[in-house]
Image (cartoon, rainbow, N blue to C red):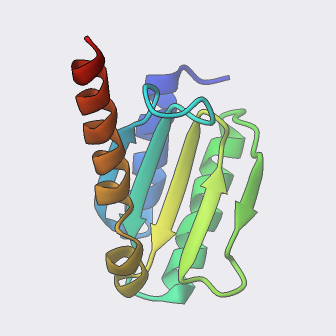
Amino acid sequence: MLELEAMKLAIIDALEDIKAFDITVMDVRKLTSMTNYMIVASANSTRQAKAIADNVREKLREKGVPLRGTEGEKEGEWVLVDLDDIVVHIMIPTARAYYNLEQLWGETESRRSASQAASA
């Protein structure tokens, strides 16, 4: 099994192989116990999103990383690849703008920090 940092870099390489863009890596270890990192990337089309997800799965499988699951491939507007320690979100720009995961998780971080400061 890959070390977490090597796994993160392998995912980014797999995303870039198929021309994913606007790749964002979020460390969510302090926010959830479900995963360590979330990586969000954009694709130009649903077809490209599916191809990117396939490439991520294939490249990580070659490195011995088990796949927990994939969701959203049928529609392709938002494909989620769950690799346990890292969850990868591949989205077309309209879906990414609508769901705005970076802001959602960023606001969670801000609220958590504020509540911890208030209780100190």
Q: Residue at x 37, y 80 (%)?
A: 98
Whether 23 is drawn above or below 112: the answer is: below
Q: Locate residue 43, reporting x and y percent.
A: 40, 77
Viewer-proximal residue among 29 and 87: 29
> Closest to the observer: 30 or 7?
30
Quadrant of the rendered image containing residue 18: bottom left
Q: Residue visible at 69% across and 77% down?
A: 73
Q: Residue at horizontal 69%, vertical 41%? A: 62
Query: Compared to 72, does 83 lie above or below?
Result: above
User: Residue farthest to the top?
Assistant: 120
Compared to 61, does 36 lie above or below? above
Q: Give percent across and percent down for residue 72.
A: 67, 75
Return the residue nearer the eye: 44 or 28.
Answer: 28
- The image quadrant where one finds the N terminus is top right
User: Would residue 107 be found to the left or right of residue 83 on screen?
Assistant: left
In screen coordinates, is 47 left or right of 112? right
